[in-house]
Amino acid sequence: MKDRVIKTMKSTLLLFILLGVVSGRRIQLLRGLPATRTVEENSPAGVCVHTFNVTLSALSSEGVAIHPTIVNSNPLTEAFDIESMGDLVYRVVTTGNPVLDYETMPKRLDLQIFVEDTSGRTDLNTLTVQVVDKNEPPVFRGNMAIQTVTIYILEGTPPEQIYQVRAADPENGGLKYSSLPASVPFLVSESGTISSKKEFDYEKDPYWYFLNITVTDPEGLNSTRTLNINIININDERPYFTMKQRIYRIPEEQSPGTVVANITAKDPDDEDSASRLFYSIQSSDTYFSINPSTGVLQVTRRIDRDVLPLQLHPNISVIVRVEDSPSGGHASEMEIIITIEDINDNPPECIPSTFRKEINENTTAGTFLLDLRNYCKDIDADVPNNLFNFTRLSGFGSNNFALESTGSGRLVMTGSIDLENPANLGVEVYSLTVRVRDIASPNYSNIIYIYIRIKPVNDFFPVFDSLSYEFNVRETTKVGSRIGKVHARDADWPPSVITYSIVAGGGTKDYTNVFWISPTNGDVKILARLDYETTQKHLFTVQASDQEKTATASVTVNVLDVNDEEPVCSPNFYSSQITVSLAAGTNVNGFRIQCQDRDSDPRSFRYFIKEGNVNNHFTFSPSAGSNTSRLILASRFNYESGLDKSWIYRLRVCITDDNLLSARDKATHLVKTGTVSLSIRVIPNPTTAITTTPGFTLVTKKENLYSDSAWYVPFIITLGGLLLLGLLGYLGLLLATWLRTRCPPVHKADGAPLINDPGKKKPKKEVVLKMTRLNTVFDGEARDPVTGKIYEFNTWSGARRWKKSNEPLQPTPAMQVTSSATDSGGHDTGRAEAPSKKETSEKRKEPTAETKRKEPTTAAKPSAGPSQTPGQDGVKVQKQK
């Protein structure tokens, strides 16, 4: 910053001087200038180049305002300065900055010197300085000019040029190079080339050399610099092992980290320092590892001498490698043999360690049972570590067994065992223990458990408690009930499992097996209903088996008679009509019932009317003591006084089989009851014979049942019905339209009477009813009060037909057909008097079979012929309107 300010001031001063000179105020103030002087190059600071003085003008009495100053702007003028010597005498001296150099600087320098007095007068003159050449010593170039150069040479490098010295003569003279001392194996040529004269070996030659290089100019001036040459060691030698031992012995089962050996090696390249070597194991063995830095060989994992392959080959070969570099260096290898020594570290083991043996009871003494040595082994590799014996036979029942010798391990019987013997009763398994023990220290041992089961021998037959069993069973006993039990024993120990079975008998003509016996406990049960009336006694044979031996016993089952049959009467349903004027005591239409009971005497029947006998008009005779009884009208009907109101009597007749029992026995004995249903219709006395044509009304009762899962069936049927109904309506509409267009209505003639002429008969309209035969089974019979013939009818559907003399009564059907006849006025001719409202409501509430049936018309024409026969299909009925 200071130099920059000085330069700025000089420039400003120079500007002022030029302005003053131009203005014409310049006078001769500098004495001794201009002048020419010489100065040697490389002159140091302070060398006087020229001396001059300043002469003041007459107007300047106070001295110099601006002292003589070099005002050149050339940077080389800084190599000079003006110093005052007093009394206005000045000299120009060198500053040494920069040093004058003849070879690199101008040979001539013009210094402009300016001065100004106090009156403002100035003077400017020139001092010419000529630089004179001087002979200088040579100068080293490059690194040797500023420092001591060190050259590094790798050992093993062949003789070659190792360095080029560079120097210069300021006067550009020729230079020569030389070196000292002469004993070093290096050569310096006159051109400055340094070459090695041999191939260096770091392990044999000196590690470094000093070489003084001198450069000389033609006039004998010289310069000297020192050159250091260091020989660099390279990795050119293999490391070698310094240990001599190659075989080591260690016991098995050493803990990981146990030191086996300390591997040492040396690298010739590092003779004067600690070798930096790297150790490794080249073999595939995993039992050992080596510290890569220290070479300590140690155990890595468990070493078991007793397993393969060490059991057969206890020597482990370990290849150790030492390297002087982690990669790419020199290496050496050495084989180390490590022998694993066996120790007694395993107890003898038996597989299995628990034995289960079965022998029959009564096995003789001395019988060989088991050889333990075949199952035991000590896995230690060497003798005596793998030797063992058997000792200490003990346990429950050990007195019956023994070991032949401690070394053999053979177990034998010493006595016979009988399970039926009270001394051995309940004992089936003997628990023994044997200790197997090492011979060598520390005498490891194990325990063998032996369980000997005495297998029972079946010596005895099963024996029933009784050779025959007899059970009394009521015939009404439910199927599956227990009726008795048989039991057998076996003297063998432990008791044998006895199973029971029926081996003979126990069947009927309807059932192969009527009885069943439990195979485990002997319980006897019935599989089918017993019937005293069919079979009074059953005999069968049961067997007891212990899987090998069997025994049998006979079983008798006496069936006890029980009143379990109810009376059965014929007919079980009867329908008839009687006139209101029928006399009391009359057998109603000659009706009688005949009953039978499989388990009761015919004299045991008793007859009574339980329901429907309003005002007790009907009774049976005889009422008890016979298997046949007649229906009798006990009292006359009285409708005129209002005592009787019902015209139809539905009687429920009960027949019991307790007539021969006393009152006390009736409370305790089982009484069975049979029933017969009667329908008696009372017909008023007819006053006028009305010709009627019998007609039939078909009443069909249908019931559709669907399962819960078929919920869609009613929906589909309903939908289909609606669609069909719509289709039929549409077709009917089309038919009506067609008839209207084809058949116009016939107009009545004028004057036609509007009131029916009573003298004219109404034309008869014939209505054809087609009867569908729903059920042709006829299970009831009755007498036609008009013709007196017996006809059969279906109790459900009401269908009728005249009875054939040789045709038996048929079972009850599921459908019925009722008949009705209407007169020309549409009134029912079959009744003389309309039933009361109460009867009508009762009929609506109880749509029984009787309400659905109607009797044949009393005024039926005999000439109706076959077309009027009940139950016939296609009957034509004419009605007058």
Image: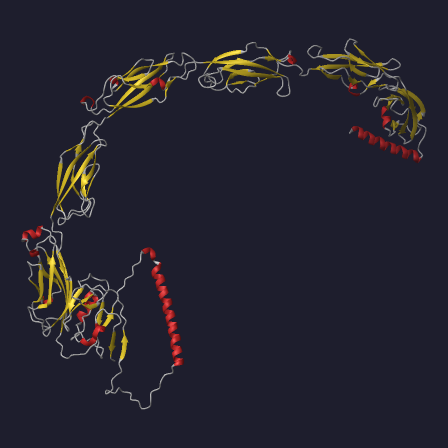
* Above or below for 406 versus 787: above
Task: Using the image, determine if residue 551 lies above or below residue 798.
Answer: above
Q: Position of residue 17 (x, y in %)?
A: 89, 32
Residue 57 locus on image (x, y percent): 93, 28
The residue most toward the bottom is 751
Quadrant (top left/top right/bottom left/bottom right) for the N terminus:
top right
- Location of residue 108 by image quarter: top right
The residue positioned 40% from the left and 80% from the top of the image is: 741
Q: How is the image coloured?
A: secondary structure
Q: Is residue 810 visible?
A: yes
Left/right of residue 423 with respect to residue 639 in the rendered view? right
Residue drawn 82% across and 16% down?
A: 192
Q: Residue placed farthest to the front in the image?
A: 806
Direction from residue 84 to residue 829 in the image, left or right: left
Pick whichever, 185 or 381, lies toward us: 381
Q: Is residue 739 left or right of residue 501?
A: right
Quarter of the figure with residue 700:
bottom left
Percent coordinates x, y for residue 565 in the rendering = 13, 53
User: Viewer-proximal residue, 324 or 689?
Assistant: 689
**Is 658 placed above or below 852 here?**
above
Residue 243: image quadrant is: top right
Residue 723, percent from left and from top: 38, 67
Is any part of residue 32 visible from this angle? no
Most foreground residue, 220 or 772: 772
User: Is 529 positioned to the left or the right of 658 in the image?
Assistant: right
Image quadrant occupied by the C terminus: bottom left
